[in-house]
Amino acid sequence: MIIKCPECGHQVSDKAPVCPSCGVEIAGHLIKCSNCGELYFKSEETCPNCHSTEQFHNVGSQNSGSEDVEESEVQYQPSPIEEFVSREDEQDDYEPEMLNSYAQQADMEEIPESEAEPAEQQNKNHVQLLVSFIIALAICGVLFYFYKQKDGDTTEPEAFEYTMKNASPGILEQFLEDYPDAPAAHTKAVKIQLAAMKQKNDERRKILQSTSRAEIIAFLKSNPSSEYKHELETKLDEMDWAEAVKGNSEESFLAYKQRQPNGTHNGEADEKLKVLLVHTASQADKTKAVEAVRKLLRGINTKNGAQIAEAVAPSFNFLGSAGATAASVEKYSRDKLYQADVKTVNWFLGEGADVTTEKNDDGTAEQHLNIPARLEINRQGGLSRKNYQIKAVVRNGKIVSINWTMRSK
């Protein structure tokens, strides 16, 4: 049992030979007053508190006399481990060797020799016991602190010192709950610390949930040593990569590499760029491919056979038919477009041509073009408009394949 030394008031085990603070003898030298419960030395004839002369029982001693001794007077002999736990309340510092010695002694007492395990297994068990015991002591220390608070054994100054030294929202709030009448300065300090920690947690939650790249960058600039720096830099990396993938272009992946020179997705960006650079058409190739299609449609609009022939290869694929020529296009125009009631036919190319470059087996390059278009036919009964999607393959500035399909819009 933990008692207060009658001499100096220091907390000490009633089984301790002497008080570790003042050195006065404890075990077997104390008496508990039956009238008021005060502990005092046997050498004193009366209780220093109520001056009663009746002795209740000795504290910290063993009774070895009559078998009729009251059960409350029989002293329990602690095991080495229990004695160590008791001593832990008397002093904060202890030697690891002492703990190991107690643990080993306890093991030796509890395991019968006939059931003893091999030496290697015993050593392993001792280590596991030691680690478990140390963890248990740490947990018990925290629980004991709150237990003492609850029972009123810890003074407010001690509680305040512990709270400020081990500040966390839970401990700070517990202090305010346990000590509503604490000095104003202590209460104010605890509340300021608690508000600061809550504000810090709110800022952390807000910035970690932010989806604004500019906001995160601004935070990192103003807080270069923030504990969230690595977490936020990782988040920026993922945001920039998602944007690059969404763009799926040479420009978007190059922009990622520029923003994140040490980004975790740089290897993937390089692989994407290899594919894109192989299939990406130069601006000159794009212009040449679009111009070939435009020239063909202009020749259809004006019924100009020479212009049609200039736009297409001598033999090409026209609307799914292989081996077509410029004459095939003229025949299609007469039969399908310029009917008896048609006044004019006009093809218009739209914006946003998608042009890629592909390499043939013989090493020659060709441009694959995908572009929207609109066909307007002015008939005697009125004007009709239809939207198409044109797909064409251009090699050396000549159309080698072209087809168009109607779009809903």
Image (cartoon, rainbow, N blue to C red):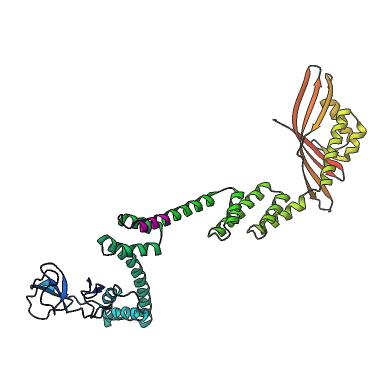
Q: In the rendering, at what x and y percent does residue 243 appear?
A: 64, 49
To which quarter of the image does residue 298 belong? top right
Magenta-drawn segment:
180-192
Confirm whether the magenta stretch covers residue 29: no
Say whether residue 278 is left or right of residue 84.
right
Q: In the rendering, at what x and y percent does residue 67 appear?
A: 7, 77
Is residue 2 visible from the viewing direction of this image?
Answer: no
Compared to residue 119, the image places residue 234 above or below, namely above
Q: Quadrant of the C terminus?
A: top right
Query: Residue sitting at 79 percent across and 26 percent down?
Result: 376
| Of the pair 200 and 337, the residue shown nearer to us | 200
Compared to residue 407, the image places residue 22 above or below, namely below
Query: Residue sitting at 30 percent across and 65 percent down?
Result: 144
To which quarter of the image does residue 321 belong? top right
Q: In the rendering, at what x and y percent does residue 283 appear?
A: 82, 46
Say whether residue 224 is left or right of residue 273.
left
Query: Residue sitting at 60 percent across and 56 percent down?
Result: 221
| Of the pair 49 and 126, the residue shown nearer to us | 49
Magenta span: predominant SS is helix
Say whether residue 181 is left or right of residue 262.
left
Say whether residue 293 is left or right of residue 273.
right
Is residue 327 visible from the viewing direction of this image?
Answer: yes
Q: In the rendering, at what x and y percent does residue 114 appear?
A: 27, 82
Q: Quadrant of the N terminus?
A: bottom left
To which quarter of the image does residue 4 belong? bottom left
Confirm whether the magenta stretch covers residue 191: yes
Q: Which residue lies most toward the top here?
A: 381
